[in-house]
Image (spheres, helix red, strand yellow):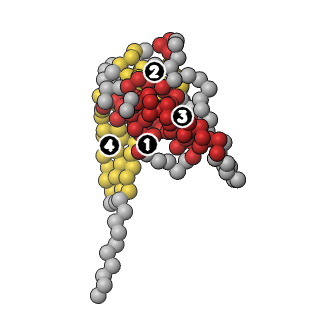
Amino acid sequence: MNIFIQIAKSVGRILGIRKSSKSRVSVEKEYEFPSHICASKIIITGPSYGDKTYFASFIVDADKLISWAFDHSKGVWSSSKNEQKAREILPVWMAIKSEDKESYISILDGPMRQVLAPYIYDFYLKGWVSYYCHLCHSQHQKLTENDHDHQSQGAHSSWIVEWICPNGHIIHRKQHDLMWIKKRVRSTG
């Protein structure tokens, strides 16, 4: 079945859910369809969002992402109602075309970013991501990965991952920490 037909069928289901869902206790405002139209490119992470670990603007081509977003909306679930609603609305929002969509880049709202940002490295590996390095004022497709400062002490491990642009600027830096928890084996004797 054509992806756009599937998305069109999802619109009614999504809007129906929005109209019928009424919670008595509401901690977060109910997610609503974005008021702006999706452009051909979307900034997923970077300084424009105040990201602390991304120092470049990572941009994905919306046309390459739409099929992934549709499959993702069917196969992944979140306990956050707004994030889940954003996951369901994302492929529909991306399918709505702007006649002038080539002239600007879309910025995501918080819940849509929660859906897409964890997959930025996967999108890079698929060749869907370019990024704008704010230090050399250039757009790039390739990056160099560097992980270092591996430390292990007992059940705790840590290391730093950096992504570097072709001109040597750090465009992403994150410290990873891992705690190993071993289940104790009880003796039955």
**Could you tell which of marks 4 and 2 lies nearer the N-terminus?**
2
Left or right: residue 43 versus residue 35 is left
Looking at this view, is 26 or 161 the one in front? 26
**Dot 3 surroundings within 10 Å: few (below 14), some, or many (20 or more)?**
some
- The quarter of the picture where the N terminus appears is top left
- Which corner quadrant of the image does residue 71 belong to? top left
Task: Please tell me whether mark 1 or mark 3 is closer to you in this view.
Answer: 3
Which residue carries the number 3 mark?
11
Which residue carries the number 2 mark?
41
- The quarter of the picture where the C terminus appears is bottom left
Marks 1 and 3 sit apart, C-alpha to C-alpha, by 13 Å
Residue 108 lies, with reference to residue 118, above or below; the image says above
**What's the residue at 57%, 46% (across, down)?**
81
**Could you tell which of marks 2 and 1 lies nearer the N-terminus?**
2
**What's the residue at 36%, 41% (across, down)?**
160
Please say whether residue 29 is visible from this viewpoint. Answer: yes
| Residue 149, disc | 4
Task: Please tell me whether mark 3 or mark 2 is closer to you in this view.
Answer: 3
Q: Position of residue 84 (x, y in %)?
A: 52, 43
Regarding mark 2 in the picture, which secondary structure is present there? strand
Please say whether residue 56 is visible from this viewpoint. Answer: no
**Could you tell which of marks 4 and 3 lies nearer the N-terminus?**
3
Name the residue type under label 1.
Lys
Which residue carries the number 1 mark?
74
User: Marks 1 and 2: in contact by CB < 8 Å?
Assistant: no
Task: Please tell me whether mark 2 or mark 1 is closer to you in this view.
Answer: 1
Q: Position of residue 136 (x, y in %)?
A: 40, 16
Marks 3 and 2 sit apart, C-alpha to C-alpha, by 22 Å
Name the residue type under label 4.
Asp
**Dot 1 surroundings within 10 Å: few (below 14), some, or many (20 or more)?**
few
Marks 4 and 2 sit apart, C-alpha to C-alpha, by 35 Å
